[in-house]
Image (cartoon, grey):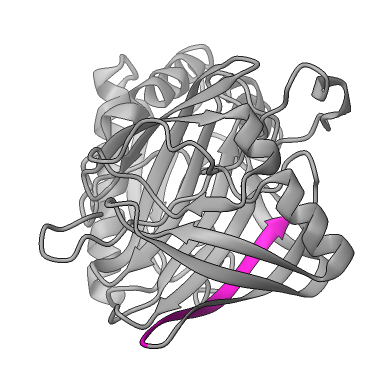
Amino acid sequence: MFTSGRRVLCMISIVGAALSGQANAQQSAGPFVTHPGKVITTNFANEFGRDADARIEITSVTPEVISLQYSSTRGLFARRDVLVRDRQSARTYVLGYSARMPTVISGSTSFGLSSAVLQELRSNGRAALTLIHSENLDRIECNLVATSVDVRVPVIIEDRILDVPTVQARVNCGSGNRTGTGHFVVANDVNNPVLIESTLNFSWEQRPRTNRVTRVVAGLGLQAEMRQALDTLGTYDVYGLLFDFDSATLRPETAQLVREIAVMLQQNPNWTILIAGHTDNIGGAEYNMRLSEQRAASVKQALISNGVSPNRLQSVGHGMTKPKADNSTLAGRAINRRVEFRRLDR
């Protein structure tokens, strides 16, 4: 998020890979392959507020350009086109999005590091990188120093938690009274050098900027997987239901997922479902219990509005009482914020 007083970039990185025609055959077929309809969710925090979510949809992919549509729970909307040639060789990385920024920032990447920077980091243990850190395109020169290779970190792929191999690096930027330090966690894939996690402390800001890729969705729908899980296990955690910041209001981009879930429930009319809201531990026990109850009720009402009988649905909030991961990290808090569907008819 930017403010007029201090135009600081709201950090966001998304999972993706851009290749020219010659490189297409070399691209891995993993969850980071870019295609239209792919949706990536990240969690970020900075001096303007605590944990918030951002969503990026890849709207088109050509041999020259990857087009993105960005939105965040803080109300920011923007578009960006990333040039494929920059994805391969650029030495500049843009830390975030703003509607005031150019759609194309030539010579930079927004998906993470370029293939060239990752290769240098892996082979030499260090690499130079320029960071664009404001909507005015202000820059700071940085050095990356590798600290470990092939450390695995959790990322939600669809609705499964998978461990992704990474290269981790220390970041040192600037000189004099304008400096920065931090760390990067980059997917260890030269074709998909995704910046999965970052922390940056800039000398002119009160709080660090943190950013974490939390979920990657192919954009093909989850009806089959959710149906199978509810049929066999009786429970399924949904991470794609996004709400406005500090609110139980479902975001507009969640409407399609709600419709898919409603159709799946209508196709299984004998099921009765408990919708349970879960939160992280930020905000206190009473606050989180109330928020989780309200969000579960909001999902229930949305399904009823899409044709599911209210007699088949119940809702409850568990707040922060049933974590699945460590609440001290961005990734852990993202895993803990979920809406659980559980069958009651079994």
In the rendered view, tell whether residue 110 sits above or below residue 149.
Answer: above
| Residue at x 52% of width, y 11% of height | 267
Span of residues in magenta: 177-187
Q: How many circles with numbers are drawn on the protein?
A: 0
Q: Position of residue 142 (x, y in %)?
A: 56, 70
Q: Is residue 187 left or right of residue 245?
A: right
Q: Quadrant of residue 286?
A: bottom left
| Residue at x 28% of width, y 44% of height | 98
Q: Considering depth in this image, is 297 or 97 the residue closer to the camera?
A: 97
Q: Position of residue 158 (x, y in %)?
A: 62, 36
In the rendered view, tell whether residue 331 sits above or below residue 41.
Answer: below
Residue 283 visible here: yes
Quarter holding the C terminus is top right
Q: Quadrant of residue 80?
A: top left
Q: Is residue 48 left or right of residue 164?
A: left
| Residue at x 53% of width, y 73% of height | 329
Residue sitting farthest toward the left: 5
